[in-house]
Image (cartoon, grey):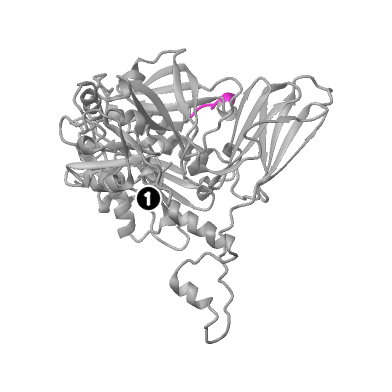
C-alpha cells in the first residue's frame, strides 16, 4: 500500500492509549508474502550491510525460543542416542547429514540438531549447512555471540575424536630426516627431478600472507599524568575503539584496530584516579591514553609490571565476547511498550559505544542462557547528553517489551540497582561515512529507530556538518512512535532535519501518511540522483522491512557505499 497523504511532520493528533502490545515487530510493514530474513550476522541486533545478510523464516506456531526452552525441560530425549555420551569420529559425524538425522560439531562437541530444526530462526536450510561437519567457523561467522552450549545442552551427543593424520606426519618426519623436501604432489615432484628437460627447477616459493604488525607501545609521565602511547598506524582509529577496565592497579586497555585487538595489560606501579582521557591523531592513528595520577608530583620509578595479555595482538574473530556486570541506574517509560534503560558500567570501566554499534544482554531464562542485541542510544535527542555518556561510564538502551518474549519480560521487571550482563560493543558501521555525504536518509520501522538516534544527533550537533537529514519512520499506530515530541522539536529547530511518519494501522484521527514501504515511496523520499547528491541511505527494522529497503535501493541504482542496513 502506498501513501495516502504527505506532510513534513504531522502534529500529534491524540494521546496514545496505554494498552500493552504482545505482538512481534510489525511483519506487516513489509507485506505478508515477503520472507523474513535472518539471524544477525557477525557483529549483531542492528548490524552490518546486506552483503552479509542471512535469511530468517517465519516459525510455525509453538516453535518460539520459549517453546524450545519448555521442550528442553520436558524430559524428552533430544540427543537421539538415549542420553549416552559418545565419542564421535569425523566419519560417523558425516553420516548424520539429513534433516531427519542431523548432527553438528562445535568446538569439539557433537550435538543432535534434528529436534532443533523447526525452532531455528534462520530456518532448516540454514541449519543444514552445518549438518555432518565441524561447524565452528560457520557458526562464528553468523552468531558467535550466541551461547550454543546452553541452547543445545539437551542435544549433546558426545565429543569429537581428534583426527590427526599420524601416518602422514611420520612419513614427513622421515623424509626430512633423510635430507629431502616434503613432496606436495606428483606434478611438483616432477618439476624438481633431475630429469627435467630444462635442468633443475628451484622449489616454488610460498608467500605467507602478511599480518598487520604489532603496534608499538611507549609511555611518558608529567607531574600529574601518565600517558600510554600506542602507534596504531590506522587512520580510522577513534577514541571509542579503546575500552578500559581497571580494578585497583590492574589496568587493561583493549584497542580495536581494524580486524585486530591489541592489549595493554599492566599492574601499574602507582595509583591512578578514575578519570581517563583518550586522544587519537586522525592522520597517523597514534593513540594517547592519559591517566591521572592519584598523587600529583609523584615521580613513578616505572610504569609497572606487564601482565598476561600485555602486547597481545589477536584477530577479533578469535576472541570470545567479553561481558561485564552493569547496574541498572534508571528505567523510564518511552511508549506504552518501550522503555529506556540507563546501565552503569563497573567502576573503573570506560566503554564509549561507537555510533551505530550495539551490545548484547545475557540472562538465564529457565536454566537456558538467552542473548539479545540492542543498539546503544542517548538519554535524549534534544537536551544535554551528560558528562557520563561522553566519559563512557553509562550506556542507554531503548527496548521494546514483548509480553510473551524470551528475554524482555525479565527486562521489564528490572529496577534500579539490579545487575545486568552486558557485552563489549560490536558492529561495522563506519561513522566517517557521515562526513563525506551531503544527504542522509534513514528508513526505520519500530525499534529500528534506535541506530538512527545517534546518527541524527551526530549529524545535527556537529558544528562542521551541513548534512541534510531525513527520517522516514514506520509504525503500526500513533502511540507506537518513539520520541515523537523530541523528533518534532528537532524538526522545528533544524532546517536540515525532517521526519515523515507512516502508520500501517492508523485510526480515523490520523491525518498523516499511511501504508508500508514501497519502491515509489522510497523513491519519493530520496533526493534526486545527481553527481553532487552524495547520498547515504540507512535502514533498520523487522528484517523483511530492511530487506525490502535493500532491494529497492539496488533497483534505484544505488551502490553499496551509498547504503547501509542494520540487520536484526
Q: Is 386 inside the magenta-drawn segment? A: yes
x, y percentage for residue 370? 34, 27
Q: Quadrant of residue 68?
A: top left
Using the image as rendered, state which of residue 550 and residue 79 is in the foreground: 79
Using the image as rendered, state which of residue 22 and residue 323 is in the foreground: 323
Q: Residues within 10 Å of mark 1 (few under 14, many from 20)?
A: some
At 16% from the left and 35% from the top, the residue drawn is 60
x, y percentage for residue 230? 69, 42
Give the answer, above or below, for where 231 lies relative to 362: below
- In magenta, the rendered stretch is 382-388
Left/right placement of residue 138 relative to residue 312 reads left
At 83% from the left and 22% from the top, the residue drawn is 298
At 48% from the left and 43% from the top, the residue drawn is 317
x, y percentage for residue 325? 49, 21
x, y percentage for residue 65? 25, 29
Residue labelled with disc 1: 52
Given the current orientation, which residue lies at the most extreme bottom position?
A: 197
Q: Quadrant of residue 419?
A: top left
How many numbered marks have been drawn onto this rendered protein structure? 1
Amino acid at each position: 500500500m502506498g501513501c495516502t497523504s504527505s506532510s513534513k511532520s504531522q502534529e500529534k493528533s491524540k494521546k496514545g492509549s496505554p494498552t500493552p502490545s504482545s505482538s512481534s515487530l510489525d511483519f506487516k510493514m513489509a507485506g505478508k508474502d515477503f520472507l523474513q530474513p535472518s539471524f544477525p550476522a557477525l557483529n549483531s541486533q542492528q548490524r552490518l550491510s546486506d552483503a552479509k545478510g542471512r535469511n530468517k523464516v517465519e516459525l510455525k506456531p509453538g516453535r518460539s525460543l520459549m517453546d524450545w526452552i519448555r521442550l528442553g525441560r520436558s524430559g524428552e530425549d533430544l540427543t537421539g542416542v538415549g542420553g549416552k555420551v559418545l565419542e564421535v569420529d569425523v566419519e560417523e559425524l558425516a553420516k548424520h547429514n539429513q534433516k531427519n538425522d542431523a548432527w553438528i560439531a562445535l568446538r569439539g562437541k557433537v550435538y543432535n540438531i534434528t529436534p532443533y530444526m523447526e525452532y531455528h530462526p534462520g530456518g532448516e536450510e540454514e541449519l543444514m549447512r552445518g549438518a555432518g561437519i565441524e561447524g565452528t567457523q560457520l557458526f562464528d561467522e553468523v552468531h558467535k555471540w550466541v551461547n550454543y552450549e546452553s541452547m543445545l545442552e539437551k542435544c549433546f551427543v558426545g565429543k569429537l575424536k581428534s583426527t590427526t593424520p599420524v601416518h602422514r606426519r611420520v612419513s614427513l618426519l622421515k623424509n626430512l630426516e633423510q635430507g629431502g623436501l616434503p613432496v606436495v604432489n606428483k606434478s611438483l615432484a616432477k618439476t624438481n627431478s633431475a630429469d627435467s628437460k630444462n635442468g633443475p627447477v628451484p622449489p616454488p616459493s610460498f608467500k605467507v600472507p602478511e599480518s598487520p604488525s604489532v603496534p608499538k607501545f611507549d609511555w611518558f609521565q608529567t607531574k600529574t599524568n601518565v600517558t600510554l602511547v600506542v602507534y596504531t598506524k590506522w587512520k580510522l582509529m577513534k577514541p571509542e575503539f579503546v575500552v578500559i577496565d581497571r580494578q585497583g592497579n590492574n589496568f587493561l586497555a583493549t584497542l580495536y584496530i581494524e580486524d585486530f585487538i591489541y592489549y595493554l595489560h599492566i599492574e601499574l606501579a602507582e595509583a591512578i584516579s578514575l578519570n581517563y582521557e583518550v586522544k587519537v591523531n586522525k592522520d597517523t592513528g597514534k593513540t594517547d591514553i592519559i591517566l591521572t595520577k592519584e598523587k600529583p608530583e609523584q615521580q613513578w620509578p616505572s610504569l609497572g609490571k606487564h601482565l598476561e595479555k600485555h602486547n597481545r595482538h589477536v584477530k577479533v574473530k578469535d576472541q570470545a565476547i567479553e561481558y561485564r556486570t552493569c547496574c541498572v541506574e534508571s528505567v523510564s517509560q518511552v511508549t506504552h511498550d518501550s522503555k529506556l534503560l540507563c546501565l552503569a558500567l563497573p567502576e573503573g570501566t570506560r566503554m564509549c559505544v561507537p555510533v551505530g554499534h550495539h551490545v548484547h544482554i545475557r540472562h538465564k531464562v529457565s536454566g537456558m542462557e538467552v542473548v539479545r542485541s540492542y543498539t546503544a542510544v542517548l538519554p535524549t535527542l534534544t537536551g544535554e547528553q551528560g558528562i557520563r555518556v561522553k566519559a563512557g561510564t553509562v550506556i542507554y538502551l531503548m527496548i521494546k517489551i514483548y509480553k510473551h518474549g524470551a528475554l524482555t519480560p525479565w527486562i521489564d521487571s528490572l529496577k534500579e540497582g539490579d545487575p545486568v550482563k552486558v557485552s563489549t560493543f560490536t558492529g561495522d558501521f563506519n561513522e566517517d561515512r557521515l562526513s563525506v555525504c551531503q544527504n542522509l536518509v534513514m528508513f526505520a520501522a519500530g525499534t529500528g529507530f534506535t541506530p538512527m538516534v545517534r546518527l541524527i544527533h551526530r549529524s545535527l550537533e556537529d558544528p562542521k556538518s551541513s548534512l541534510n537529514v531525513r527520517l522516514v519512520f514506520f509504525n503500526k499506530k500513533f502511540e507506537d512512535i518513539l520520541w515523537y515530541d523530541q523528533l518534532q522539536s528537532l524538526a522545528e529547530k533544524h532546517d536540515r532535519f525532517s521526519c515523515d511518519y507512516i502508520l500501517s494501522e492508523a485510526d480515523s484521527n490520523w491525518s498523516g501518511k499511511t501504508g508500508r514501504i514501497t519502491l515509489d515511496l522510497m523513491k519519493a523520499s530520496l533526493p534526486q540522483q545527481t553527481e553532487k547528491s552524495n547520498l547515504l541511505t540507512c535502514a533498520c527494522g523487522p528484517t523483511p522491512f530492511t530487506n525490502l529497503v535493500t532491494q529497492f535501493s539496488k533497483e534505484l541504482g544505488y551502490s553499496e557505499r551509498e547504503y547501509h542496513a542494520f540487520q536484526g
